[in-house]
Image (cartoon, rainbow, N blue to C red):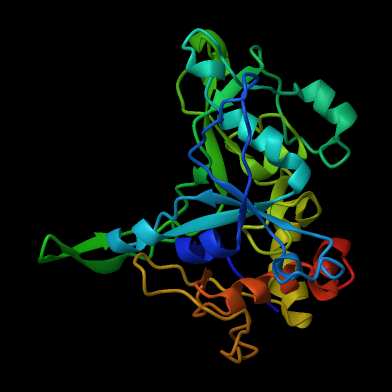
Amino acid sequence: MRLFKFLVISDEVVEKYGLPFERKNADGTPLNTKNEFFNYCYDINLNHPEKGDKAIVFMSIDYPNEGKDFGYTNKAYAIINANDIEEVMKLISPSDNNSKNKFKGCTVNNCNRCMKLSKPCRNKNVSINVDKNYIRGKTWSFANDKSGTKNNVTEDLAGNLITRRIEPKTGGIAYSSIQWKDGIRPEAFKEKTIAVPLHHWIKCNSIPPKPAKKGNYSFYHIGHTFDYRKEFIGLATKREQENLRKEIEPKNNIRRGRRVLAGQGYFSRTLECDCRPSESNPKCRDCEGVLYIDTEQGLEDLYYQLLSNEYRQLSEGKTI
């Protein structure tokens, strides 16, 4: 099985096959967020509801590595649980009725409460106490995670070909920079920008320590890096994650595409991996880490992989 870091879907496919999700204010007016949400269920779209009892929820995120033209007609997406949409939207929602005097945000569980309520976090040193726990963000976006691989990108700007050298974001981890109620930040955060990773918010609802120490537990994506459903987010130490990626996954024929370059020509349209990695190169280092979907068939293939028994075994540990 091949796993990817980024999922990019064309606007044409989303508009044709996605079902938009809208959230409204108390007065019934639409609540607009930069991130867009839509449901997709292939069988329902084909009028076979008896076969399609589960929909996939996609949340749009700006793809950080595209060329200019590519960004006009495509977006990157993260997958979340349907019952998490309200909370995920609430963190980045504007105030009700667009009033500057109302601070619309989420209440963050402090560390002690998180340890009591969240079994995955208990005694793992992955959350901290905060003095002011009513916060909100601006948007979910990708972390500034770089591999050190720069790439030349040539774009046509007003008839002129311009070549830029770009260092791409490679992690595929969604974060939201947060704001504090009344602008009052806890003393520990006075000198730095604070961001909450989406997977931590969904799984724990507290703010993680930053930076995490080498021996600390941290959240990781068991499947595709863009899959933020609860069952595909886990906790492990750095050593455990390295063992999973280097030893266990290759033995179970699970391959992770790692090649992420800036520009719009570096992606894969297929879920299959055909690089035939050797024993000396088991990580698919040269395989594209970006899955690009611009056809109905591509969306259907991803849908069935995400709901397949083979993929779900990743979260259940049966492959290991």
Query: What residue appears at the point 61 percent right and 71 percent down from the top-left corner?
Result: 299
In the image, taking residue 199 as reference, residue 157 lies left or right, namely: left
In the image, taking residue 249 as reference, residue 77 lies left or right, namely: left
Query: What residue appears at the point 70 percent right and 46 percent down from the top-left corner?
Result: 218
In the image, taking residue 162 as reference, residue 67 lies left or right, namely: right
Where residue 9 appears, as percent x and y from the top left, is 51, 64
Residue 2, above or below 176 = below
Q: Is residue 7 visible?
A: no
Where residue 251 appears, as percent x and y from the top left, is 77, 81
Which residue extends farthest left?
160
Quadrant housing residue 262: bottom left
Residue 28, above or below 37 = above
Q: Please name whichever residue, 225 or 247, is drawn nearer the observer in this view of the structure.
A: 225
Q: Is residue 48 visible?
A: yes
Q: Please name whichever residue, 14 or 109, is drawn nearer the observer in this view of the structure.
A: 14
In the image, taking residue 141 as reference, residue 255 lies left or right, namely: right
Residue 45, above or below 31 = below
Where residue 119 appears, as percent x and y from the top left, is 89, 38
Query: What residue appears at the point 80 percent right and 71 percent down from the top-left corner?
Result: 48
Residue 186, above or below 9 = above
